[in-house]
Amino acid sequence: MLLGFLDHMRVVPDHRIPGMVTYPLDEVLLSTLVGVVCGADDWDGVEEIATGALDWLRSFLPFADGIPTAQTLRRVFRLLDTEALQRGFAAWAASLRAETREVIAVDGKTLRGSKTSPDGKGALHVVSAYATEAGLVLAQRAVNGKSNEITAIPELLDMLNLKGAIVSIDAMGTQKEIARAIVDRGADYVLALKGNQTSLHEDAALFFADPVCAADCATSAGTDAGHGRIEERSCRAAGAKWLAERHPEWEGLHSLAAVAARRIDKKTGRESLETRYYITSLEPDPKAILAATRAHWGVESFHWTLDVTFDEDRCRTRKDASALNFAVIRHTGYNIIRADKTKGSLRRKRLRACIDPAFRTKLFAA
């Protein structure tokens, strides 16, 4: 896995002056990746961990001049070609994933530690594609704020092999051009509806509110318990030929669905009910649509892991391109640890990788 990553990173150009480079780029990338996998959350941590693992690292690359200093790492990552790094990452991630009929969830996350002012402005926002069954980050694109996800998503999709997949996106990404791009790439979509698609949302709400229409819907339900609550979910689905005729600009529109989630707090008994509407290119199979909408929340678990296990929101790396480039390495580390099937949390595996060279070798050799 490690050598495959380095091979794909050969597309990243070294911006430094030839003949004046002490630490080759592959050694800089490898030092940073190993540091992140083993628990580092900043450049000083990367230098410290990589220095402690120098003999182990020399089994992969020469490291003739030792480990790059934190200042060197910081300087290199500030100017590293983000486009090339993201393309290399996407190609490497694609090599880890079998082509299967799974949900690829697209969602964005703000790197709060990258803010440039006390009020939070200037923080980098990264939109990621997450293979929910494989548990892998497939690609990412950076935008200036959540409102610009619409422009980043088509670029993100263009980096992926979507054939046979089901792409799920929240309401921000429910756009005609995005639906068309998904269908053109041989995939299906499940897109959430909210007020930003006023006409579609209103049509869906009116349809499911009509007792006659609702009576003809196929239904499916499921229940989960955890985190101190019980969640009951149900899905009603119907063919949407009439809706596609009203909105012919939505490529592949085939079905309409309503997913209701009833949550009960075990301690207080308090209940909440939320209904979400979706358009999809799938057949009106409520079980399949419910599974797809449920799988989408795997990307939220991924974001939670970045914050809690990788401490992403407290990372203050932010100058020039360093925030995005470090995020790409963080995603790489996540994929490497996530691919390991040994029992234990990701946090415990990071600690074990730091102190146990044999386990570290196992992670990177997978």
Image (cartoon, rainbow, N blue to C red):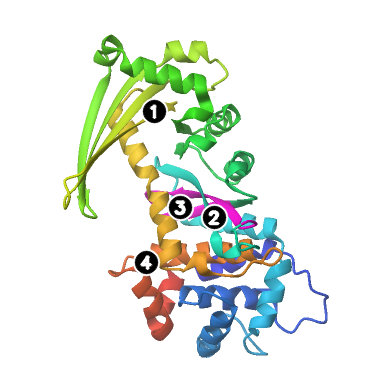
Q: Dot 3: few (<14), some (14–19), or many (≥20) neighbours within 10 Å?
A: some
Q: Is residue 188 left or right of residue 298?
A: right
Q: Is residue 128 magenta?
A: yes
Query: CB of mark 3 within 8 Å of CB of mark 4?
Result: no
Tell me: residue 202, above or below residue 152: above
Query: CB of mark 2 within 8 Å of CB of mark 1?
Result: no
Structural distance between the alpha carbons of marks 3 and 2: 26 Å
Residue at 53% x, 37% y: name it: 172
For marks 3 and 2 on the same chain, the one whose residue lies earlier in the sequence: 3
Amino acid under disc 3: Arg
Name the magenta segment's main secondary structure: strand
Structural distance between the alpha carbons of marks 3 and 1: 30 Å
- SS of the residue under disc 2: strand
Answer with the quarter of the image where residue 85 lies: bottom right
Q: Is residue 8 visible?
A: no
Structural distance between the alpha carbons of marks 3 and 4: 14 Å
Q: Which residue is mark 1?
A: 277
Q: Nearer the viewer, mark 3 or mark 1?
A: 1
Quadrant in which the C terminus appears: bottom left
Disc assigned to residue 110: 2
Q: Which residue is mark 4?
A: 340
For marks 2 and 1 on the same chain, the one whose residue lies earlier in the sequence: 2
Structural distance between the alpha carbons of marks 1 and 4: 36 Å
Residue at 61% x, 49% y: name it: 145
Q: Nearer the viewer, mark 1 or mark 4?
A: 1
Q: Nearer the viewer, mark 3 or mark 2?
A: 2
Disc assigned to residue 97: 3
Structural distance between the alpha carbons of marks 4 and 2: 27 Å
Residue at 61% x, 58% y: name it: 123
Q: Tell me where residue 198 appears, x and y as whole percent.
A: 51, 23
